[in-house]
Amino acid sequence: MLNAIKKELAYGYRWLFIVLAVILASASVATSGFVRAPAPSEYNVVKALVLSTDDSALTPDPYITGMYIGMQPVTLRIISGEFEGVTIELRNAMSRAFNIHCEKGMTILCNVRGEDGILTGADVFGYSRDRMVYLLVAVFALLIIVIGRSKGIYSIISLFFTLIIVLCFLIPRVMAGADPVSIAIVTAVISTVITVFIVSGVNIKSLAAVAGVSAGIAASAVTASVAGAFGNLSGIHMPEAQEMISLTRDIPLNVPKLLYAGIIIASLGAIMDVGMSVSSAVFEVYEANKTLSTRALLRSGMNVGRDIMGTMSNTLILAFAGSSISVLMILVMYNLPYLRLINLDILCVEILTGFAGSIGLILTIPLTALCASVMSVKIGSQA
């Protein structure tokens, strides 16, 4: 009877956090400033169906296989927007920087211009990739639900919440001039609390995981900030850093701290995974043998954490390296002397992003193991 009551309470608490997640997500969206009427513009992006093309004036790019350069006459029929059904002919200029190769039957995006309901001009804008995105998301959601069942549904809810909180809470506040590192830490902790309690339920094990993960996130933030300041890393070589500065001229955007905030958010998933795994292991050992001391449970948690540590650190560092593969290739092509290479701003930024997150991940293991072992003995024995 007591176990049934505990299960009902746990189920109720989980849905309480789901409702809380919905409220927080809705509040973030409402206060983000993203929900507003679109600014009036004479330019509109619409979909168009390619009816015919003429590739006779195109020449193959000598450096990139499958790419063509030149002028491509195309005939299109607009299939969305105000001018739906209108057929137009235009010349598609293809260069290495802007290269949209139209083929008959393909759906593309067009930038159309109109005045008083009359189409006055159009340009090829890009490939239509929305169907691919929707299909990939649908396959991901289907697989996670089929394999994870109820846990999969909870995972999707928590993932959706995390995306909303990052897009509609973190980014608007950073754009408004708030400290990026502080906002990133708050975002990471909120995401951790909601995710862990929704996916794993409201219990001591989840509480220990939240405590360990929060400490690991703080360790990542401190490591990134101290190492970045010590190495005089400005973050100005981050992709699109210059463009961000030009677009936010009236806002005191702190680029170095934006770099550190990115490290915190990027490493959050791996840190959360490790924290939950270690906490679960400690509580499983405790449930199997409730006579074990805090020290014995800590030792068990550390043993499990050490097994996880190697692969997860590799995962995190390789994820950063994979996202920066073009930068690494350029550095190799330059064949720079070691002293110059190891002190390059762009390389040190990549090293910082990989290792600061990994240090936070590694420190999450003993911190979570300690929290879980203490809580299991002190609180679990009284439950």
Image (tube, grey):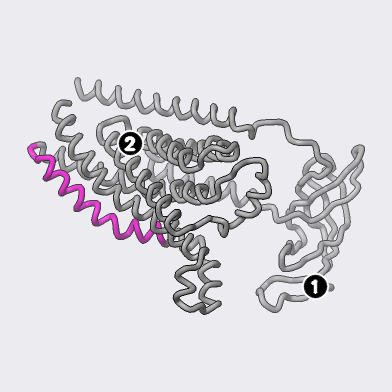
Q: Residues within 10 Å of mark 1 (few under 14, many from 20)?
A: some
- The residue under the point 40% across, 37% down is 189
- The residue under the point 88% across, 43% down is 114
Secondary element type, mark 2: helix
| Disc ID at residue 200 | 2
Q: Amino acid at mark 2?
A: Ser
User: In screen coordinates, is 292 left or right of 358?
Assistant: left
What is the span of residues highlighted in magenta in the rendered image?
A: 291-317
**Position of residue 237 measured from the top left corner of the image (x, y, whole percent):** 57, 59
| Disc ID at residue 172 | none
Q: Residues within 10 Å of mark 2 (few under 14, many from 20)?
A: some
Note whether residue 315 is visible: yes
Which of the 4 image quarters holds residue 53?
A: bottom right
- The residue under the point 9% across, 40% down is 292
* Residue on which disc 1 sits: 58
Q: Amino acid at mark 1?
A: Leu
Quadrant for the N terminus, please: top left
Which residue is at the front of the view, 267 or 336?
336
